[in-house]
Amino acid sequence: MALELVSGALLSAFLQVAFEKLASSQILDFFHARELDQKLLNKLETKLHSIHSLADDAERKQFMDTHVRNWLLKVKDVVLDAEDLLDDIQKLYTSQVDTESESQTCSGCTCKVLNFFKSSPISSLNKEIECRMEQILDGLEFLSSQKGDLGLKTASGVGSGLSNELPQKSQTTSLVDGTDIYGRDDDKLLIFEWLTSDINNRNQPSILSIVGMGGGVHRRLKEELKGKKFLLVLDDVWNENQPKWEEVRKPLVFGAQGSRILVTTRNKEQLQEDDCWKLFATHAFRDDDTQPDPECKKIGMEIVKKCKGLPLALKTMGSMLYNKSSVSEWETVFQSEIWEFSKERCNIIPALALSYIHLPSHLKVCFVYCALFPKDYEFKKENLIQLWMTENFGHCRQHSRTPEEVCQQYFNDLLSRSFFQQSDEKKEVFFMHNLLHDLAKYVGGGIYFRCELDQTEKIQKVTRHFSFEIGHNEYFDGFGTLCNTKSLRTFMPKARSTMISFWRWEMKMSIHELLSKFKFLRILSLSHYSDLQELPNSVGNLEHLRSLDLSRTAINRVTEKICLLSHLQILKLNYCRDLWELPSNLHLLTNLCRLEFKKTNVSKMPPHLGKLQNLKVVMNSFDIGHNKELGIQHLGELNLVGSLSIEKLQNVENSLDALEADLKNKTHLVTLKLRWEGNRNSIDSKKEEDVIENLQPSKNLKKLSIFGYGGKQFPKWLLENSLWNMTSLVLDECESCQCLPPLGLLPFIKVLKIRKLNGIVIIDADFHGNNSSSFTSLKALEFLSLSRWEKWDCQAVTDAFPQQLIPLETLQIQGCQQLEASSPRALDLQLRECGKLQLEWGRTKSLTMIRSLLETVGSSPTHLEELTLSYCLKFESLPGSMHMLLPSLRSLCIQGCSILESFPDKGFPSSLKVLKIINCSRLVGSLKGALTDNSSLETLWIIEPDVECFPDEGLLPLSLPSLIISNCPNLEKLDCKGLHQLSSLQNLYLISCLNLQSLPEEGLPKSISKLRIRDSLRCQKEGDEDWEKIAHIQERYIS
């Protein structure tokens, strides 16, 4: 079989760095100045090229031969040793150039540095460098000599894998929506029938196996299953050992009749042939307007068969072939010997191995780095890109693109090839499938090492990148195993979830020991370290450090020694709440491109940060003081990123200072809050108008909030709708403003909140923009505490809220007691302390009314699912035919409606599932006629009733499954007959019934399986008077 073409071996990415360093003038000048043997450099370059000629063949064969895999890992180790040596040489050269440059200003500076090298002690340094070089050459010679024994073949045209230019097709990456599901319709029907069937063995739980791809979260078996009916899901089962399964089954057979066990596994075919082709074609042929090449389609069908029905294999293989346009390339993939390798040697799915092999080398190194993450780890795109940048993965010969832009392209390429999957579209959160995580770990070997809490495997000497699992207040002593790992480049803790912010860790090794031991560190994270108050000065010796994360520590001072780290690119100090100031010489860090200090007490900016042209600053707030050191003008020199709240704007003395903040040119700022403090003795409206006018944001702004503004009119840049990209706007406590801007013209505004604008009396067509179409994207609208607001003329505009065909998701009007108007349609309508509103129901699904009046017109509320009426004191009755008018009603809550005395005689809609009656004792008594024994009601809440005994005989429907009685200070006893009639009652809650004397003598209904008693004097512990009456209940929660 012909040698398969590979896009570029992972080793090529390592070699590229070494070749570039060997060709640098710094290395050549250093060898010349120190009179070192330049033949050593030539030998090193020759040996590296010799190794590189074997890289592509070894890349493929590592999946078929563990000896080749081990050889590759050893080669990478030696190449990284070579890179470390060349780094040291470059650092020596640069440090001496800098030293000489500081003392000499003449043009012959470089010559004087070379003279310095010649005049300094040579022998010891030369011997050390030459000795390390010889060791590297010996290692490469030994590894090169093994190619015959390993059967490695030399590739022709060596060098193609070294380029990390962006491939032409990936310039506009075509992403596939990953939400389509194929081949599961029959499975869904099968599961439903299985769960609802009565066929079962009384002595054995019923088991159903679902075959598919792994990647879900494993659930722990529940304890105390005896006598309980359960559904147990065993997700991602691999083990087929029969004796072990017998051990698992033993405690399960004691469950109640009807118990079910659902097993998912990935050991067999999952999708049918047609579904396999659909999934593959979705990713391989993304251009719907073009027909695939017939020959490619034919080969593709054969490749689909080799994927054996596994969805992840089909997705990654299709995504990989999308980037290959010729028939010969498709044929090469189909004929690859990788399809035939034995899983006993390598537990990697062949299709995934092939997809990896055909990645370009620059994508391989980015992918393998993710082996440092835990399985099922959800990560943010920007955080991973920052790690890649600091590892210099974004270095590209296309100098028109920044490293960040290059790494963003790399990320999108891996996403388009299905190596990453999107977890939540709104949060830019992604994850990597477990099987791909296994692949990354396999290829990375010991070089990328993650240590789990319960892991016995020890870190290897070759390890360069190290992450470790931490939990809540975890003491981790695994660092003692790092003794033989001198060349560590990455050191970072990683919890299994990014959502957990309170975890802490500590270690036996001191921070000083850690910093002294690993001089090659590029990425160092001490985030969440529990006892870090100050960094030792030895941090200044980490000459290669590019990223330092001290977030969520107790650090109160950052040593000035940090300003010696000339390669530092990223510094994170987020949530360091004891930190009050930053080092004054940060401007000396010429490579610093990202500084983060959200949620700290830092108020004063270090001087001269504006000199760092590539620096992006992430800070959550800036408090303006009365002196110039704390003036708003200091924001002008910062390239702000993300979100910013500018506080105490009343302290701006001169509106020109606000202009110097230069917010208009801060294009990376997407969220902005402008806040004036309240309770001021006097307000200079004209000054505040001038200040806000000069705080015009960039057109890229997405979210804007204005608090406490004292001007009489809003700024022109808001009136003129220059912020076209804005999606959220909050106007709060702008009490002097008498009219609103034409916000209806903002095409992308989704959330609009207007609060405490007491100057507003009328909202008319100007608010909508006097346009034939306004608020075209609005989803959530809120008006809060507009005490003088009387009129809302939204019908003056022909197409105000044109999405009324698709209503607002949420409309909330609260504290607007003077308002009388027609309300726009909304799926969720919340009215609190309003005047009188007129509503056309439309597709409203939820209505909440608190101390409000509502007049309805038009069609019936056929879509209404939730209705809440609270303290509507003029509300006299529910519709007599509500069982017909509200056919979709699922939840009804009535609270404090004192005039409302009874429910309709014809009862409730058959759809009603939840009924809450709060502080309406008269209504409770009318339940007998309203609820029938055939009622569909599932949960009844009785809260704050004025009763001494409950429930009366015949009051509640016999079919009621759940009853909650809460806040009943006068309740003394439960009616025995009324309670025992409830033959279907399963759940009973008694909450804050402090005067409940005793439970019924006959006990509680035998049907009850769950009982919760809270804030009651009865049944506190076993042996109490009523304990025997509840001893039979399976789940008891008493507090």
Image (tube, rainbow, N blue to C red):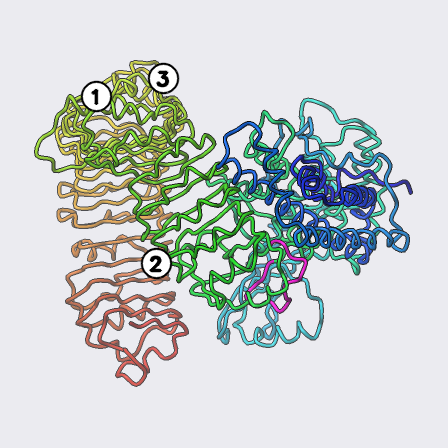
| Contact flag, marks 2 and 3 (Cβ < 8 Å) | no
Q: Which residues are magenta?
A: 450-465
Number of residues whose C-alpha sits closer than 10 Å to that of mark 1, classed few (under 14), some (14–19) or many (20 or more) = some
**Looking at the image, is 713 positioned above or below residue 94?**
above
The residue at 57%/73% (across/down) is 252
Q: Which type of secondary structure does the marked residue at label 3 adopt?
A: loop
Q: Which residue is mark 1?
A: 690
Residue 679 is inside the magenta segment: no
The residue at 16%/64% (across/down) is 947
Residue 497, percent across and down? 49, 54
Q: Which type of secondary structure does the marked residue at label 2 adopt?
A: loop
Q: Nearer the viewer, residue 318 or 525?
A: 525
Residue depth check, mark 1 versus mark 2: number of the one nearer the observer? 1
Query: Mark on residue 773?
Result: 3
Residue depth check, mark 1 versus mark 3: number of the one nearer the observer? 1
Q: Which residue is mark 2?
A: 933
How far is the residue under mark 1 from the one under mark 2?
Answer: 69 Å
Question: Is residue 947 visible in this depiction of the protein?
Answer: yes
Residue 473, picture quadrant: bottom left
How far is the residue under mark 2 from the one under mark 3?
Answer: 52 Å
